[in-house]
Amino acid sequence: MTGQHNYSLTITWTGNRGQGTTGYKDYDRNHTLSVQGKPDILCSSDTAFRGDATRHNPEDMLVASLSSCHMLWYLHLCADAGIVVTGYTDNATGVLQESPNGGHFTNVTLHPVVTVTDASMIEKANELHDIAHKKCFIANSVNFPVLHEPQCRTK
């Protein structure tokens, strides 16, 4: 696979309460993420930054992007290797450190729990997480460690 892939989306701020950004507490952080042909995603900032807890925030979406990209590569590699995955759940976590200049993620840890059809597949299934990590487009694009602590089991 080679080539360039382009992505476009629209972010529309919906948090103007009528007076715009006249003061830090005078506006909502709500916004809508729109991608043509896909459902809108209602967003805000994290509640720590005056956001709406019922909406996704950029930090959620960064961790989700890392988790999703890893999973998609992992499933691809398992299919190619003849490993039959019947279940995959990841309870991913990320750590954001605030600083006087804003802040940054210090790490994200993926915790995938994978179910395979046969115990003989577990060793190879666990090894494929390292390869998936190396191939993940998103993990290759961030400047902090993306760790993974997988578990593999049979049903």
Image (cartoon, rainbow, N blue to C red):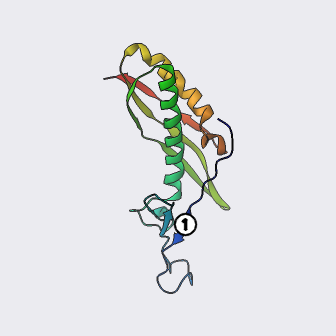
Picture quarter with the C terminus: top left
Q: Residue at x 54, y 66 (%)?
A: 11
| Left or right: where 71 falls relative to 85 | right
Q: Position of residue 132 (x, y in %)?
A: 56, 31
Using the rendered view, name the quadrant where residue 91 is placed. Answer: top left
Picture quarter with the N terminus: top right
Residue 45 shows in the view: no
Using the rendered view, name the quadrant where residue 40 is placed. Answer: bottom left
Q: Is residue 51 above or below residue 108?
A: below
| Left or right: where 135 falls relative to 25 | right
Q: Position of residue 129 (x, y in %)?
A: 53, 28
Q: Is residue 136 above or below residue 18?
A: above
Q: Residue at x 47, y 31 (%)?
A: 75
Q: Residue at x 52, y 86 (%)?
A: 19
What residue sits right under mark 1 in the picture?
A: 11
Q: Residues within 10 Å of mark 1 (few under 14, many from 20)?
A: some
Callout 1: helix, strand or loop? Answer: strand
Q: Residue furthest left?
A: 155
Task: Pick whichever, 94 or 116, lies toward us.
Answer: 116
Q: Position of residue 127 (x, y in %)?
A: 53, 21
Q: Position of residue 147 (x, y in %)?
A: 56, 35
Amino acid carrying label 1: it is Ile
Task: Pick whichever, 79 or 103, lies toward us.
Answer: 79
| Left or right: where 80 falls relative to 5 | left
Q: Residue furthest top?
A: 120
Residue 78 shows in the view: yes
Number of marks drawn: 1
